[in-house]
Amino acid sequence: MNLSKWNWKRLIRDWKTRILCVAFFLFLGTFSLLYRQQNLPLPLDEMRSRYEVTQQLFNIIPEREFQGEMGEEIYTLLARQQRLYGMQRFILSEQEGNTVENLEKVVANYVDNGLEIAENQLRLWEMTDFPSYRVMSGTLPEKQEIERELSFLTYLKQHDLDIEWNPFSASHILQQELELIAGILLFLFAALLGADRFTQDQTKNWSVTQGIPVPWKKQWHQRAFHLWILMWGVILSGSAVSYVSSLIRETPGSLSYPVSIYMGNGFGHIALWQYATLLIIGAMSLSMLLLLLTTGLSWMIRNIYLTLALVVSLYYVPFIWQTIRPFSSFQPSLYLHVGDVLKGISMELTGATGIVFWKIPLAFLLLWALLEAAFGRVFDFIPTQTIGLKRRETA
Protein backbone atom coordinates (compact mmCIF):
# COMPACT_ATOMS: atom_id res chain seq x y z
CA MET A 1 0.00 0.00 0.00
CA ASN A 2 2.83 2.40 0.88
CA LEU A 3 4.57 1.60 -2.39
CA SER A 4 1.39 2.31 -4.34
CA LYS A 5 0.96 5.63 -2.55
CA TRP A 6 4.59 6.56 -3.14
CA ASN A 7 4.39 5.68 -6.86
CA TRP A 8 1.17 7.66 -7.22
CA LYS A 9 2.68 10.76 -5.61
CA ARG A 10 5.79 10.43 -7.73
CA LEU A 11 3.62 10.22 -10.84
CA ILE A 12 1.48 13.28 -10.21
CA ARG A 13 4.46 15.36 -9.09
CA ASP A 14 6.35 14.65 -12.29
CA TRP A 15 6.49 17.87 -14.34
CA LYS A 16 6.30 16.02 -17.67
CA THR A 17 3.14 14.18 -16.61
CA ARG A 18 1.54 17.42 -15.45
CA ILE A 19 2.28 19.18 -18.73
CA LEU A 20 0.89 16.26 -20.76
CA CYS A 21 -2.30 16.08 -18.72
CA VAL A 22 -2.89 19.82 -18.94
CA ALA A 23 -2.19 19.84 -22.69
CA PHE A 24 -4.60 16.97 -23.43
CA PHE A 25 -7.24 18.42 -21.09
CA LEU A 26 -7.08 21.78 -22.86
CA PHE A 27 -7.32 20.10 -26.27
CA LEU A 28 -10.27 17.92 -25.30
CA GLY A 29 -11.99 20.70 -23.37
CA THR A 30 -11.83 23.06 -26.37
CA PHE A 31 -12.60 20.39 -28.98
CA SER A 32 -16.08 21.76 -29.63
CA LEU A 33 -14.61 25.19 -30.39
CA LEU A 34 -12.07 23.68 -32.79
CA TYR A 35 -14.68 21.48 -34.47
CA ARG A 36 -16.93 24.45 -35.22
CA GLN A 37 -14.15 26.00 -37.30
CA GLN A 38 -14.84 23.45 -40.05
CA ASN A 39 -17.05 24.03 -43.07
CA LEU A 40 -19.37 21.02 -42.91
CA PRO A 41 -22.13 20.43 -45.47
CA LEU A 42 -25.59 20.99 -44.03
CA PRO A 43 -28.40 18.46 -44.59
CA LEU A 44 -30.25 21.39 -46.18
CA ASP A 45 -27.49 21.74 -48.79
CA GLU A 46 -27.73 18.03 -49.59
CA MET A 47 -31.48 18.31 -50.21
CA ARG A 48 -30.95 21.31 -52.44
CA SER A 49 -28.39 19.34 -54.44
CA ARG A 50 -30.73 16.36 -54.84
CA TYR A 51 -33.53 18.66 -55.97
CA GLU A 52 -31.30 20.24 -58.63
CA VAL A 53 -29.97 16.87 -59.86
CA THR A 54 -33.51 15.54 -60.29
CA GLN A 55 -34.45 18.71 -62.17
CA GLN A 56 -31.49 18.21 -64.50
CA LEU A 57 -32.62 14.67 -65.33
CA PHE A 58 -35.74 16.07 -67.04
CA ASN A 59 -33.46 18.19 -69.24
CA ILE A 60 -30.95 15.42 -70.00
CA ILE A 61 -33.29 12.52 -70.73
CA PRO A 62 -35.10 12.89 -74.09
CA GLU A 63 -38.83 13.47 -73.76
CA ARG A 64 -39.64 10.53 -76.03
CA GLU A 65 -38.15 8.10 -73.51
CA PHE A 66 -40.83 9.06 -71.00
CA GLN A 67 -43.48 7.60 -73.28
CA GLY A 68 -44.95 4.14 -72.78
CA GLU A 69 -45.85 2.42 -69.53
CA MET A 70 -42.31 2.31 -68.09
CA GLY A 71 -41.45 5.82 -69.26
CA GLU A 72 -44.59 7.28 -67.70
CA GLU A 73 -43.92 5.47 -64.41
CA ILE A 74 -40.37 6.79 -64.29
CA TYR A 75 -41.56 10.30 -65.13
CA THR A 76 -44.11 10.10 -62.30
CA LEU A 77 -41.50 8.80 -59.84
CA LEU A 78 -38.96 11.49 -60.73
CA ALA A 79 -41.60 14.23 -60.50
CA ARG A 80 -42.67 12.88 -57.12
CA GLN A 81 -39.03 12.73 -55.96
CA GLN A 82 -38.48 16.34 -56.92
CA ARG A 83 -41.58 17.41 -55.01
CA LEU A 84 -40.49 15.41 -51.94
CA TYR A 85 -36.99 16.92 -52.06
CA GLY A 86 -38.59 20.34 -52.18
CA MET A 87 -40.65 19.60 -49.08
CA GLN A 88 -37.61 18.18 -47.25
CA ARG A 89 -35.64 21.27 -48.14
CA PHE A 90 -38.36 23.52 -46.75
CA ILE A 91 -38.69 21.50 -43.52
CA LEU A 92 -34.95 21.64 -42.87
CA SER A 93 -34.79 25.36 -43.58
CA GLU A 94 -37.42 26.04 -40.91
CA GLN A 95 -35.40 24.14 -38.25
CA GLU A 96 -38.50 23.13 -36.30
CA GLY A 97 -38.21 19.33 -36.42
CA ASN A 98 -39.84 16.79 -38.69
CA THR A 99 -42.54 19.15 -39.90
CA VAL A 100 -43.52 22.81 -39.94
CA GLU A 101 -46.17 24.06 -37.57
CA ASN A 102 -49.53 24.75 -39.23
CA LEU A 103 -48.23 23.36 -42.54
CA GLU A 104 -48.33 19.64 -41.74
CA LYS A 105 -50.86 18.93 -44.51
CA VAL A 106 -48.74 20.76 -47.08
CA VAL A 107 -45.21 19.49 -46.40
CA ALA A 108 -46.13 16.33 -44.44
CA ASN A 109 -43.52 14.71 -42.15
CA TYR A 110 -39.79 14.59 -42.88
CA VAL A 111 -39.45 10.94 -41.88
CA ASP A 112 -42.47 9.81 -43.91
CA ASN A 113 -41.20 11.77 -46.91
CA GLY A 114 -37.75 10.22 -46.50
CA LEU A 115 -39.15 6.69 -46.39
CA GLU A 116 -41.08 7.34 -49.60
CA ILE A 117 -37.97 8.79 -51.27
CA ALA A 118 -35.92 5.70 -50.39
CA GLU A 119 -38.62 3.33 -51.64
CA ASN A 120 -38.86 5.28 -54.89
CA GLN A 121 -35.09 5.06 -55.31
CA LEU A 122 -35.20 1.28 -54.93
CA ARG A 123 -37.97 1.14 -57.53
CA LEU A 124 -35.94 3.26 -59.95
CA TRP A 125 -33.00 0.85 -59.56
CA GLU A 126 -35.27 -1.89 -60.86
CA MET A 127 -36.04 -0.06 -64.15
CA THR A 128 -33.11 -1.64 -66.00
CA ASP A 129 -34.90 -1.61 -69.38
CA PHE A 130 -35.17 2.17 -69.42
CA PRO A 131 -33.08 3.59 -72.34
CA SER A 132 -31.38 6.21 -70.13
CA TYR A 133 -31.00 3.83 -67.18
CA ARG A 134 -27.24 4.45 -66.83
CA VAL A 135 -27.78 8.21 -66.67
CA MET A 136 -30.62 7.89 -64.18
CA SER A 137 -28.94 5.29 -61.96
CA GLY A 138 -25.81 7.43 -61.85
CA THR A 139 -27.75 9.96 -59.77
CA LEU A 140 -29.08 7.37 -57.32
CA PRO A 141 -27.39 6.29 -54.07
CA GLU A 142 -26.11 2.71 -53.91
CA LYS A 143 -28.67 0.11 -52.86
CA GLN A 144 -26.81 -0.62 -49.62
CA GLU A 145 -26.84 3.07 -48.77
CA ILE A 146 -30.59 3.27 -49.48
CA GLU A 147 -31.25 0.30 -47.20
CA ARG A 148 -29.25 1.96 -44.42
CA GLU A 149 -31.25 5.15 -44.95
CA LEU A 150 -34.48 3.14 -44.63
CA SER A 151 -33.22 1.61 -41.39
CA PHE A 152 -32.21 5.05 -40.10
CA LEU A 153 -35.57 6.66 -40.89
CA THR A 154 -37.48 3.69 -39.48
CA TYR A 155 -35.55 4.10 -36.22
CA LEU A 156 -36.46 7.79 -36.10
CA LYS A 157 -40.13 6.97 -36.66
CA GLN A 158 -40.25 4.19 -34.08
CA HIS A 159 -38.61 6.35 -31.41
CA ASP A 160 -40.40 9.57 -32.38
CA LEU A 161 -37.17 11.51 -32.96
CA ASP A 162 -36.64 14.65 -35.02
CA ILE A 163 -34.14 14.82 -37.85
CA GLU A 164 -30.91 16.62 -36.88
CA TRP A 165 -30.48 19.65 -39.11
CA ASN A 166 -27.42 21.02 -37.29
CA PRO A 167 -24.08 19.16 -37.83
CA PHE A 168 -22.61 21.21 -34.96
CA SER A 169 -25.12 20.06 -32.33
CA ALA A 170 -23.70 19.08 -28.94
CA SER A 171 -24.53 15.39 -29.38
CA HIS A 172 -22.89 15.24 -32.82
CA ILE A 173 -19.71 16.94 -31.59
CA LEU A 174 -19.59 14.53 -28.64
CA GLN A 175 -19.74 11.60 -31.04
CA GLN A 176 -16.90 13.01 -33.14
CA GLU A 177 -14.77 13.66 -30.07
CA LEU A 178 -15.23 10.16 -28.68
CA GLU A 179 -14.33 8.65 -32.05
CA LEU A 180 -11.15 10.74 -32.11
CA ILE A 181 -10.29 9.67 -28.56
CA ALA A 182 -10.72 5.98 -29.47
CA GLY A 183 -8.39 6.49 -32.44
CA ILE A 184 -4.88 7.88 -32.79
CA LEU A 185 -5.26 10.12 -29.73
CA LEU A 186 -5.47 7.08 -27.44
CA PHE A 187 -2.21 5.62 -28.79
CA LEU A 188 -0.42 8.97 -28.58
CA PHE A 189 -1.58 9.73 -25.03
CA ALA A 190 -0.66 6.26 -23.75
CA ALA A 191 2.75 6.35 -25.43
CA LEU A 192 3.62 9.79 -24.06
CA LEU A 193 2.51 8.94 -20.52
CA GLY A 194 4.22 5.60 -20.17
CA ALA A 195 7.33 5.85 -22.33
CA ASP A 196 9.66 6.63 -19.41
CA ARG A 197 7.94 5.06 -16.39
CA PHE A 198 10.72 2.53 -15.78
CA THR A 199 13.38 4.39 -17.73
CA GLN A 200 13.47 7.10 -15.05
CA ASP A 201 14.25 4.55 -12.35
CA GLN A 202 17.27 3.27 -14.23
CA THR A 203 18.67 6.45 -15.76
CA LYS A 204 18.30 8.40 -12.51
CA ASN A 205 19.38 5.40 -10.40
CA TRP A 206 16.56 5.76 -7.88
CA SER A 207 17.77 3.28 -5.29
CA VAL A 208 14.57 3.81 -3.28
CA THR A 209 12.62 2.08 -6.04
CA GLN A 210 15.17 -0.61 -6.81
CA GLY A 211 15.76 -1.50 -3.19
CA ILE A 212 12.15 -2.34 -2.29
CA PRO A 213 11.48 -6.11 -2.19
CA VAL A 214 8.52 -5.92 -4.56
CA PRO A 215 8.37 -7.97 -7.77
CA TRP A 216 8.88 -5.97 -10.95
CA LYS A 217 5.72 -7.48 -12.42
CA LYS A 218 3.67 -6.06 -9.56
CA GLN A 219 5.23 -2.63 -10.07
CA TRP A 220 4.47 -2.94 -13.80
CA HIS A 221 0.78 -3.55 -13.13
CA GLN A 222 0.63 -0.87 -10.49
CA ARG A 223 2.22 1.88 -12.56
CA ALA A 224 0.15 1.06 -15.64
CA PHE A 225 -3.03 1.20 -13.55
CA HIS A 226 -2.06 4.59 -12.07
CA LEU A 227 -1.47 5.93 -15.56
CA TRP A 228 -4.83 4.50 -16.71
CA ILE A 229 -6.67 6.32 -13.91
CA LEU A 230 -4.86 9.56 -14.71
CA MET A 231 -5.49 9.20 -18.46
CA TRP A 232 -9.21 8.63 -18.17
CA GLY A 233 -9.61 11.30 -15.53
CA VAL A 234 -8.22 13.77 -18.07
CA ILE A 235 -10.19 12.34 -21.02
CA LEU A 236 -13.58 12.21 -19.31
CA SER A 237 -13.26 15.60 -17.63
CA GLY A 238 -12.06 17.25 -20.84
CA SER A 239 -14.87 15.69 -22.87
CA ALA A 240 -17.42 16.79 -20.28
CA VAL A 241 -16.19 20.40 -20.48
CA SER A 242 -16.41 20.30 -24.28
CA TYR A 243 -19.95 18.85 -24.19
CA VAL A 244 -21.18 21.47 -21.72
CA SER A 245 -19.62 24.18 -23.86
CA SER A 246 -21.48 22.81 -26.90
CA LEU A 247 -24.76 22.80 -25.00
CA ILE A 248 -24.30 26.50 -24.24
CA ARG A 249 -23.26 27.55 -27.75
CA GLU A 250 -25.20 25.20 -30.03
CA THR A 251 -28.36 23.12 -30.19
CA PRO A 252 -28.28 20.14 -27.80
CA GLY A 253 -29.20 17.44 -30.29
CA SER A 254 -30.25 14.10 -28.81
CA LEU A 255 -28.29 11.34 -27.09
CA SER A 256 -30.98 8.98 -28.40
CA TYR A 257 -30.18 9.86 -32.01
CA PRO A 258 -29.45 6.73 -34.12
CA VAL A 259 -25.91 5.73 -35.06
CA SER A 260 -25.26 3.07 -37.70
CA ILE A 261 -23.19 0.06 -36.57
CA TYR A 262 -22.25 -3.19 -38.28
CA MET A 263 -23.90 -6.24 -36.69
CA GLY A 264 -22.44 -9.05 -38.78
CA ASN A 265 -25.54 -9.77 -40.84
CA GLY A 266 -25.92 -6.17 -41.95
CA PHE A 267 -26.11 -2.63 -40.60
CA GLY A 268 -28.44 -1.59 -37.82
CA HIS A 269 -28.94 1.45 -35.62
CA ILE A 270 -28.54 2.04 -31.91
CA ALA A 271 -28.92 5.17 -29.78
CA LEU A 272 -25.97 7.54 -29.54
CA TRP A 273 -25.62 6.96 -25.79
CA GLN A 274 -25.37 3.20 -26.42
CA TYR A 275 -22.78 3.74 -29.14
CA ALA A 276 -20.82 6.08 -26.88
CA THR A 277 -20.89 3.50 -24.07
CA LEU A 278 -19.53 0.76 -26.34
CA LEU A 279 -16.88 3.13 -27.68
CA ILE A 280 -15.71 4.24 -24.23
CA ILE A 281 -15.59 0.70 -22.82
CA GLY A 282 -13.61 -0.47 -25.85
CA ALA A 283 -11.24 2.50 -25.65
CA MET A 284 -10.73 2.01 -21.90
CA SER A 285 -9.83 -1.64 -22.40
CA LEU A 286 -7.48 -0.87 -25.28
CA SER A 287 -5.79 1.96 -23.36
CA MET A 288 -4.97 -0.40 -20.49
CA LEU A 289 -3.28 -2.78 -22.93
CA LEU A 290 -1.35 0.10 -24.49
CA LEU A 291 -0.18 1.33 -21.08
CA LEU A 292 0.94 -2.15 -20.05
CA LEU A 293 2.88 -2.43 -23.31
CA THR A 294 4.39 1.05 -23.04
CA THR A 295 5.50 0.73 -19.41
CA GLY A 296 6.92 -2.74 -20.12
CA LEU A 297 8.87 -1.51 -23.12
CA SER A 298 10.18 1.42 -21.07
CA TRP A 299 12.11 -1.09 -18.92
CA MET A 300 13.34 -3.22 -21.82
CA ILE A 301 14.32 -0.54 -24.33
CA ARG A 302 15.32 2.37 -22.07
CA ASN A 303 14.92 4.73 -25.00
CA ILE A 304 11.91 7.03 -24.78
CA TYR A 305 11.76 7.93 -28.46
CA LEU A 306 11.97 4.33 -29.67
CA THR A 307 9.22 3.32 -27.24
CA LEU A 308 7.04 6.18 -28.48
CA ALA A 309 7.58 5.19 -32.10
CA LEU A 310 6.79 1.53 -31.48
CA VAL A 311 3.56 2.15 -29.57
CA VAL A 312 2.21 4.84 -31.90
CA SER A 313 3.06 2.73 -34.94
CA LEU A 314 0.65 0.06 -33.67
CA TYR A 315 -2.19 2.36 -34.73
CA TYR A 316 -1.24 1.77 -38.37
CA VAL A 317 -1.12 -2.04 -38.16
CA PRO A 318 -4.80 -2.52 -39.18
CA PHE A 319 -4.09 -0.69 -42.44
CA ILE A 320 -1.85 -3.57 -43.49
CA TRP A 321 -4.93 -5.77 -43.87
CA GLN A 322 -6.30 -3.47 -46.55
CA THR A 323 -3.62 -4.76 -48.94
CA ILE A 324 -3.22 -8.25 -47.45
CA ARG A 325 -6.38 -10.24 -46.83
CA PRO A 326 -6.75 -11.13 -43.12
CA PHE A 327 -6.17 -14.78 -42.22
CA SER A 328 -9.08 -14.77 -39.78
CA SER A 329 -11.64 -12.31 -38.42
CA PHE A 330 -10.37 -13.16 -34.92
CA GLN A 331 -6.96 -11.55 -35.49
CA PRO A 332 -6.46 -9.10 -32.58
CA SER A 333 -4.74 -6.53 -34.82
CA LEU A 334 -8.01 -6.01 -36.70
CA TYR A 335 -9.66 -4.56 -33.59
CA LEU A 336 -7.22 -1.80 -32.66
CA HIS A 337 -9.57 0.79 -34.24
CA VAL A 338 -12.62 0.39 -32.01
CA GLY A 339 -14.75 3.03 -33.74
CA ASP A 340 -14.06 1.63 -37.22
CA VAL A 341 -15.06 -1.86 -36.08
CA LEU A 342 -18.32 -0.60 -34.59
CA LYS A 343 -19.28 1.39 -37.69
CA GLY A 344 -18.31 -1.36 -40.13
CA ILE A 345 -15.48 0.63 -41.70
CA SER A 346 -12.93 -2.09 -40.91
CA MET A 347 -15.19 -4.66 -42.55
CA GLU A 348 -15.62 -2.57 -45.69
CA LEU A 349 -11.89 -1.78 -46.03
CA THR A 350 -10.64 -5.34 -45.48
CA GLY A 351 -13.56 -7.24 -47.02
CA ALA A 352 -13.76 -9.53 -43.96
CA THR A 353 -17.44 -9.67 -43.02
CA GLY A 354 -16.61 -11.40 -39.73
CA ILE A 355 -15.15 -8.25 -38.15
CA VAL A 356 -17.94 -7.44 -35.67
CA PHE A 357 -17.97 -5.51 -32.42
CA TRP A 358 -18.73 -8.46 -30.12
CA LYS A 359 -15.32 -9.94 -30.98
CA ILE A 360 -13.53 -6.89 -29.51
CA PRO A 361 -13.44 -8.31 -25.92
CA LEU A 362 -12.12 -11.63 -27.22
CA ALA A 363 -9.34 -9.90 -29.17
CA PHE A 364 -8.34 -7.76 -26.19
CA LEU A 365 -8.33 -10.75 -23.83
CA LEU A 366 -5.95 -12.54 -26.19
CA LEU A 367 -3.68 -9.47 -26.37
CA TRP A 368 -3.70 -9.19 -22.57
CA ALA A 369 -2.74 -12.84 -22.21
CA LEU A 370 0.14 -12.37 -24.67
CA LEU A 371 1.39 -9.29 -22.79
CA GLU A 372 1.22 -11.07 -19.44
CA ALA A 373 3.09 -14.08 -20.78
CA ALA A 374 5.77 -12.05 -22.56
CA PHE A 375 6.56 -9.54 -19.82
CA GLY A 376 6.08 -12.10 -17.08
CA ARG A 377 8.88 -14.05 -18.70
CA VAL A 378 11.02 -10.93 -19.03
CA PHE A 379 10.57 -9.88 -15.40
CA ASP A 380 11.42 -13.40 -14.19
CA PHE A 381 14.97 -12.74 -15.30
CA ILE A 382 15.20 -9.60 -13.15
CA PRO A 383 16.33 -10.31 -9.55
CA THR A 384 14.48 -8.30 -6.92
CA GLN A 385 16.74 -6.79 -4.27
CA THR A 386 15.77 -7.70 -0.74
CA ILE A 387 18.67 -6.35 1.31
CA GLY A 388 17.43 -2.76 1.20
CA LEU A 389 19.69 0.26 1.63
CA LYS A 390 22.81 0.19 3.75
CA ARG A 391 24.03 2.99 5.95
CA ARG A 392 27.27 4.50 4.64
CA GLU A 393 30.18 3.62 6.86
CA THR A 394 32.94 6.09 7.50
CA ALA A 395 36.55 5.05 7.85
Image (spheres, rainbow, N blue to C red):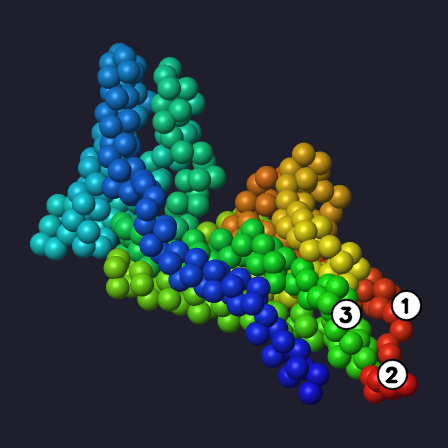
Give the left or right position of residue 62, taking residue 154 as reference: left
Q: Kindly check if marks 2 and 3 are in contact, taking CB atoms under 8 A apart as contact.
A: no
Q: Nearer the viewer, residue 285 or 121?
A: 285
Q: Looking at the image, tell me whether mark 3 or mark 1 is earlier in sequence order.
A: 3
Q: Nearer the viewer, residue 250 or 291?
A: 291
| Relative image position of residue 252 (x, y in whole percent) | 29, 62
Residue at mark 2 to residue at mark 1: CA–CA distance: 15 Å
Q: In percent of the image, x 35 and y 40: which residue is there?
A: 118
Q: Helix or strand or loop: what does disc 2 sit on?
A: loop
Q: Label for residue 386?
A: 2
| Kind of element beneath mark 1 | loop
Q: Determine crowd level at label 2: few under 14, some 14-19, many 20+ residues with C-alpha closer than 10 A.
A: few
Q: Which mark is residue 381?
A: 1
Residue 143, picture quadrant: top left
Q: Nearer the viewer, mark 2 or mark 3?
A: 3
Secondary structure at numbered mark 3:
loop
> Residue at (22%, 55%) from the top-left corner?
97
Q: Quadrant of residue 245?
A: bottom left
Q: Please name whichever residue, 317 or 113, is drawn nearer the observer in this view of the structure.
A: 317
> Which mark is drawn over residue 33?
none
How crowded pointer 1 is (Cα within 10 Å; few <14, some 14-19, many 20+) is rated as few
User: What residue type is disc 2 on?
Assistant: Thr
The amino acid type of the residue labelled 3 equals: Asn
Residue at image mark 3: 205
